[in-house]
Image: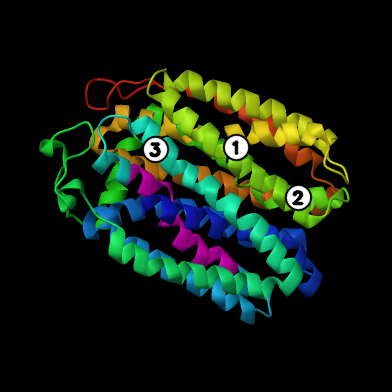
Amino acid sequence: MTFLALVGAAGFRAVPGVLMEPLRDEFGWSVTTISAAVAVNLALYGLTAPFAAALMERYGIRPVVVAALVVVAAGSGFTVFMTASWQLVLCWGVLVGLGTGSMALALVATVTGRWFVARRGLVSGVLTAGGATGQLVFLPLIAVVAESSGWRTAALGVSVIALAVVPLVLLLLRERPRDVGAVPYGGTAADDHDPVRSGAGRLAIKGLTDAARTAPFWYLAAGMMICGATTMGLLQPHFIPAAHDHGMPQTAAAGLLALVGLFDIVGTIASGWLTDRFDPRYLLLGYYVLRGASLAALPALFGPDIQASMVAFIVFYGLDWVATIPPTMALCREIFGAQAPVVFGWVFASHQVGAAVMALAAGVVRDVSGAYDLAWQVGGALCLLAGVLSLAVRRDRVGSGATGS
């Protein structure tokens, strides 16, 4: 059930990238204007995460996920009445951003921490891959529906699907192992801790203030900010319009982006398996450096037809897409202990702030220069920096004598 919720969250959040061209055609809005709504969506998708994690501790996973699905349905459904760009920001930016953010990776951290003691790296990889599956399922479908029946039909379809998941969550989602007479996998009943009943806002802010006193938090947050900038902020919303600029049909470009999701399932699960066996810092170094090299090569690969070189890029980028999440989550658990879900929520918030900034910046670059080339090149350079930052993280538990760099 958690996997299904994550599939939906990622799919719902990715839809604006597919609708960018139809919205430009109907309303005459610039890429920058539409990118502003995407940026708000991405920022709230991340900034909601720590508070969602705290709300799950305070009130439970099920009510938070149900409320999030209803908000997504409202945001997507109201877009059919849009007449101005600020309404796009409100619906797809604010409402869909808040809703999907409440079902994002803070949910992965919470479920992994509650239900598993052994194999946490692998489990976090499998659940994170739910995001890739959402992209894989939704992007080609939404592109086809938008092209054949209009973008409004696609938006209403998202709303209906979100509401359809609500009864499944109410019937099937369980809070803790004890609810089904079990213990956490690889652990004992003592590992099934009672929930924290303090105020959700206070819990989220305390997690941030405690973590912000440590250098590892800032290294992880900065690395994840670059991770978000070069995936959800750059490639996800701008790959389809960039390919369209080079004469590629939108449905073909959406199919390629969906392939990223397909290979991300493999890459993220493999990354979780590797995280259980190797130093997460070196995994992050490898992921970021290779990602940067592939981004630098991307501008030369675009064309009206799908060439083998572009397919190779898509396969590689898919394997690396969010392979960074399992090792980052593992480092949060090692360093911050019981506070890890909330701390990871803040680290993930930085991921989405980076995504929001890059989503807007890439739109501005496209409008000013007429091409996305500079955006791809800057993204590649930033990835090299993220690799260096990953090596600077110390793995000592906070409170056991290591809070510095």
**Dot label at residue 124:** 3
Q: Is residue 95 magenta?
A: yes
Q: Which residue bears the numbered disc 2?
A: 253
For label 3, the crowd category at 10 Å Cα-Cα, with few meaning under 14, some 14 to 19 and many 20 or more, is many
Provide the secondary structure element on which disc 2 rests: helix
Say which of 373 and 215 sits in front.
373
Q: Residue at x 36, y 54 (%)?
A: 1
Q: Residue at x 61, y 71 (%)?
A: 155
Q: Taking 238 as reference, is 168 left or right?
A: left
Task: Check disc 2 and give the amino acid type.
Answer: Ala
Provide the secondary structure element on which disc 1 rests: helix
Note whether residue 188 is visible.
yes
What's the distance in space between the residues labelled 2 and 3, CA to CA? 29 Å
Q: Which residue bears the numbered disc 1?
A: 263
Going from N to C along the chain, the mark reached first, 1 or 2, is 2
Q: Quadrant of residue 17?
A: bottom right
Instruction: Give x and y (percent) for residue 233.
Output: 62, 47
Say which of 336 and 312 sits in front.
312
Please, what is the dominant secondary structure of the magenta stretch?
helix
Q: Residue at x 48, y 28 (%)?
A: 271
Q: Quadrant of residue 316?
A: top right
Q: Is residue 196 magenta?
A: no
Q: Residue at x 21, y 39 (%)?
A: 184
**Which stretch appears magenta?**
89-110
